[in-house]
Amino acid sequence: MNTVLLIAREEWRLWARSRVVLVAALIVAVLLAVTSAITAARVGDEAAKRTARQASAEATFFAQPDRHPHRMVHYGHYAFRSPPPLAAFDPGVDAVTGQSIFLEGHRQNTAMFADTRSGADLGGFAALNPANLYQLLLPLLLIIIGHGMVLRERESGTLAVMLAQGQSGLAIAGGKALALAGVAALFLLPVAGLAGFSVAAGEAPLAAAILVAGYALYLGVWVALVLAVSLLVRQRSVALGLLVFAWLLIALIVPRLAINAGSAAVDAPGKIESDLVMLAQQRALGDGHNAADPAFDALQKQVLEQYEAASIEELPINWRGVVAGYSEAKLTDLMNGYAEARMQKEAQQSRIVTLFGLVSPTLAVGASSRTLAGTDLATHHRFLRESEALRFDFVQGLNDLHAKALTYADDAARSADPEAEARTRVNADAWRLLETFRFVPDPATQRVARAGLPLALMLIWLAALGGVIAVGARRLRP
Amino acid sequence: MSAVLREARFLLRDRGALLWIMLALLLSVAATGFGIAEVRDQRATIAELLVEDARDRANALAGQSDWGGAAYAAFHLTYAPPSEFSFAALGQRDTAPWLHRVRMLALEGQIHEADTKNADFGLIGRFDFAFLAAAVAPLLLILLLHDLRGQERVAGRHDLLVATAGKPSRLWLPRAGLRFAGLATALLLPFWAGAAIEGAGMAKVLAASALVLGALALWWLIIELVGRAQASPPVLLTALVGIWLALALLVPAVARAAIEASTPVPDGAEILMLQREAVNGAWDLPKEATMRPFLAAHPEWEPLGEVTRPFEWKWYFAFQQVGDGQAAPVAKAYREGRIARDRAAGIAAFLSPTALVERGFERLAATDTAAMIAYEDAVRAYHGELRAFYYPMLFRDPPYDPAVLSQLPGYTPAQ
């Protein structure tokens, strides 16, 4: 054990004297610090803004004057997706998906106004955030620092001396691994700091801890890869070339090819496409604005029987409101079916992309990071589902009011009779039926469970590379 | 000439170099192939939707008994088909909508709908030819060329070779040139084949090829200048990768952050809220309050502009347009902000060959921000046509005749 530490310490001493290592490490450290501060400030600002907008949307709804309840169904409401605390580290899909959604009767709208739509387009990876730096830049730093670890000893002839002194290849590899892992651990401090910061802001400690562990695992994979190449390759320039090539493949090429593959393998229809298919079905359900639509005959018969009434005029409730509520429920069922199918297709695509983590740990760490931060596609889907539930609740609450607070006679006469119209206006206190909405991601345990697959993929990488290193170290010859 | 032949023989025996060139070829085939598949998929989607859209509209119009009901019920598909060159650069098509279904209601409530794909696609990005040429190819060139001198130094032949060659350029130029040509050919051949399959215009293909070659030549120059330093191949490679990182990643990211901070864009959600308040508020206002601003914008309907009944379609559609009008200043600022940011990004791209190549490809493919805004403008213009078609019916209110609706304007995408 002592030898391992000695070898590691020797390596650290050497790196501390190397200008290339110091300059590279310093640049990365500064970048990380600056990006972390900027992202944390920006996301915090954004979260405050969206929470304020959500509150103001609710206040606006409550402040509406006395009205016919169906007018409020069309007046509608907004739901905002506030970024969770860990978005300060990994904003994830936040910039790509819309942040707010307009909720109204008879329709499911899309989330609108994504940042990317108004962003300055400077090509592929023009967005810097701490998560990106960890995923792309830190592996390069480890490569630059560590590619010569064993090769240096080989080239200078000290490897032969060490082996002759009776140090085992395993101890040498262990010492080198410890040395580079120490550097990686040092560079885990910013993410650990941001994780702590997010816990202070209300994030679950479990999710924050596993997020940091995921990055530790990721950097561990790179440490192992760098060490393995340094052990097995005989020339320094070849080792560096090989590692840069591996980085190019793992960090840049495979993730994008995975997107191509996911998109080609699963055809997820867009909303307009699936809405068109849905519309044909929807028409068969009847128009909820038109209570005389023959589609409602069966409902009418049933309601008349229930209230033992001979005609809709005799009903103690407003038939128009009944129809509005009934057709909204039917329609929502239909819309949810299509929305669910669409989301499942997207989730399938993303699962294919995540499975490419078997080839690229960068993809795996990205998936686990977004999942744990609550900024992944599944969390966006959760937002869509929850805002839909919110929409359905207030619309049905208003429809209930429409059925119970208004008389059928007034409701039918309101277009022609101003007095009847006045009686169909419901007191504005009723608008309080709208529930307050504050979006939060899934509970930490669920996020951790979802991150299990990508984390396992990285473990597989680490185990495989560990095996390669062990074999290579045992066979280490000068 | 003999120097080139000699170097060609050397290259054929240099397994490392052949590996990078083969890899470039494979990646280019993959990028082009996936690009073509995606573009065809999008075209098939549009073709399918056009049929469905017509069927749905016929269905919606069949049950109508008045002009206003028809205008309310009929949706119209608008779309931006991918260009023949899009296969090389999908650009904004993954994040910006290129499909809408609009009707006569207030447009601001419809045009911002985002029919976008899986958010992960927009986040990670596709591996298209533009990305390959802009970001990956320079790294491959670096890997190919960084240790030409270093190899010879390690082999102990460097000084001898330089001395016998007379001029150093006679030695290194053919060697590096051949590798450069090999890489460029491996990249461009599949791209040209793809362009031929897709029928992309010759001028565009030539411009794109020139862009790729120009950017790669710039990288060659950088590698050459750095390579002259008396340093070991690993240090040279480290320096070159550092330069690549700075130019491909950091400069665009910093430029983007700076542009977005200095050119604010109004919050899009504000457009919708303004429009909603205006449209919904109109129900509670006297009809005059809607008709006055409407008739000011459309004086031709002044003689028929009086609303007498509690509900009239002409009033209903008038307040839809007035609602659009109220949101117009913010919508305009949003549009102009995006254009200003894009213009600034176009200038900033000169600092980064990567951004320059990607933007160049997106422009050639009409998948850049400008093209997406042009599509939105086309949707606005089309919506205007719909209004121009329906207003005479709504205001003059001739007897309802479904046959007239066969003359409804259709959307034709710009080419």
Image: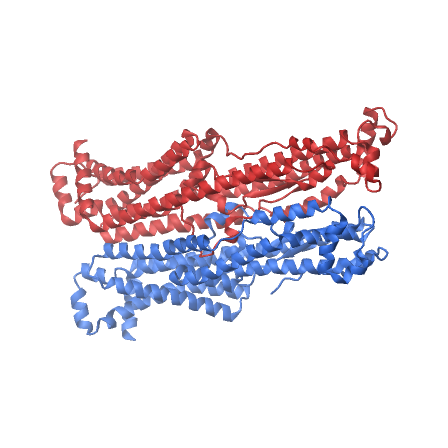
Tell me where residue B219 appears, x and y as whole percent.
34, 63
Seen at 24% across and 37% down, the residue is A178
Q: Is residue B80 visible?
A: no
Seen at 86% across and 56% down, the residue is B399
Q: Is residue B378 above or below residue A327?
A: below
Specify the farthest residue to the right.
A310
Q: From the viewer's perspective, tell me whether residue A56 is left or right of residue A199.
A: right
Q: Is residue A416 above or below residue B159?
A: above
- On the rendered image, what quadrant is the C terminus of chain B found in? bottom right
Q: Is residue A185 above or below residue B406?
A: above
Tell me where residue A307 appears, x and y as whole percent.
82, 24
Q: From the viewer's perspective, tell me whether residue A106 is left or right of residue A39.
A: right
Of B105 and B97, the residue lying toward us = B105
Of B7 and A200, the residue lying toward us = A200
- Which chain is rendered red in the image? A
Q: Is residue A70 above or below residue A206?
A: below
Seen at 18% across and 47% down, the residue is A17
- On the rendered image, what quadrant is the N terminus of chain B found in? bottom left
Picture quadrant where residue A331 is located? top right
Picture quadrant where residue B258 is located? bottom left
Q: From the viewer's perspective, tell me whether residue A402 is left or right of residue A166.
A: right
What colour denotes chain B?
blue
Coloration mode: by chain
Q: Is residue B42 visible?
A: yes
Of A22 and B37, the residue lying toward us = A22
